[in-house]
Image (cartoon, helix red, strand yellow):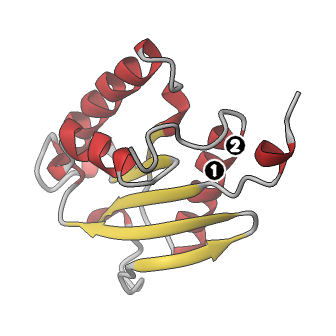
Amino acid sequence: MANNSTADFQPQITLLYCRQSLAAEAKPVQGQRAGEGFGVRLVLLPCSSKVQLPHLMRLLEKGADGVQIAACPEKACQHLVGSNRAEKRIARGRGLLEQVGMGAERLGLDRGAGLSLDDLMEMAGQRAEAVRALGPNPMKGV
């Protein structure tokens, strides 16, 4: 049962992506993009292991409705275990969000190789759909 504010809700997703997850010919992009029914801010990382739990919470505090990480494949990480570290941090963050009633779906991680901008936008769109059911981020503007 969605109210009007939820029906009109356009989630704002921050997508952090590992350079190693992109296709070799893909040019790294950063900044705001508009998707169909959502907005996304793309942020390039040297490695997904650079994502720390306090940073994820800060992104939500600063207004993101959801955060998606695009990590390199487990066996292709140039930092050996970087994407595994990111996965553990996302799992911890999801647990914390669930405990406080904000919904674990606000955080997500997918692995990929050879990704294009379209692939990143699709990931962001999937996170937006998961977040749409939760409604706007209650930490926004706190």
Image location of residue 106, percent across then percent down: 50, 37
Marks 1 & 2, CB-CB < 8 Å contact: yes
In-image side of 19 versus 35 (left or right): left
- Counting from the top left corner in percent of width and height, residue 57 is at 30, 40
Residue 32 locus on image (x, y percent): 48, 77
Up the image or down, 87 lies above or below 50; here it is above
141 and 39: which is toward the camera: 141
Instruction: State the residue position of label 2.
Output: 132
Density class for disc 2 (Cα within 10 Å; few <14, some 14-19, many ≥20) is many
Q: In which quarter of the image is residue 15?
A: bottom left
In the image, farthest residue toward the front: 142
Residue at (30, 23) in percent of width and height: 92
Q: In which quarter of the image is residue 75?
A: top left
The percent coordinates of residue 142 (x first, y second) are 38, 43
Q: Name the residue under label 1.
A: 128
Q: Nearer the viewer, residue 130 or 69?
A: 130
Element under label 1? helix
Tag 2: residue type? Arg
Residue at 35% over, 59% down = 16
What is the three-letter code of the residue carrying label 1?
Ala
